[in-house]
Amino acid sequence: MDAYSGYNQILVHKDDKAKTSFIIERGTYYYKVMPFGLKNTGGTYQRLVNKIFKEQIGKILEAYMDDMLVKPPKRADHIKNLAGAFNLLS
């Protein structure tokens, strides 16, 4: 599961949207989802992934900054474990 391609998005909390504002010629804007160019986005994303997959990490799944690897102990359980991981993401 590739997290690097940018499909995963973290919503910015409503109280923090003003902190991400920027001004251009046409007006003032803010981010609704966390752009991966901000300073703490990487750490925030990793903490969120660790929280979502806390029961699976180390057992059937490894989560890295831009990659998630499902690796079940038994080959026969691979499809079931993949389905479980995708269910958590949806």
Image (cartoon, rainbow, N blue to C red):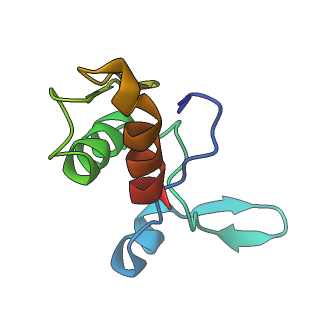
Q: Is residue 73 left or right of residue 33?
A: left
Q: Is residue 65 left or right of residue 31?
A: left
Residue 65 at x, y percent in the picture: 38, 26
Query: In the image as oriented, which residue stretches furthest toward the right?
Result: 26
Residue 89 at x, y percent in the picture: 45, 55
Number of numbered discs present? 0
Query: In the image as oriented, which residue stretches furthest toward the bottom?
Result: 14
49 lies above or below 19: above
Q: Is residue 5 left or right of residue 15?
A: right
Viewer-proximal residue among 23 and 31: 31
> Which residue is pictured at 38% across the width and 73% down the height?
13
Q: Quadrant of residue 67?
A: top left
> Which residue is pictured at 23% across the width and 20% down the height?
73
90 lies above or below 56: below
Viewer-proximal residue among 11 and 8: 8
Residue 85 at x, y percent in the picture: 40, 46
Residue 54 at x, y percent in the picture: 16, 46
Viewer-proximal residue among 43 and 73: 73
> Which residue is pictured at 37% across the width and 70% down the height?
16
> Which residue is pictured at 38% across the width and 50% down the height?
84
Q: Quadrant of residue 77?
A: top left
Viewer-proximal residue among 21 and 50: 50
24 lies above or below 78: below
Q: Is residue 68 left or right of residue 6?
A: left
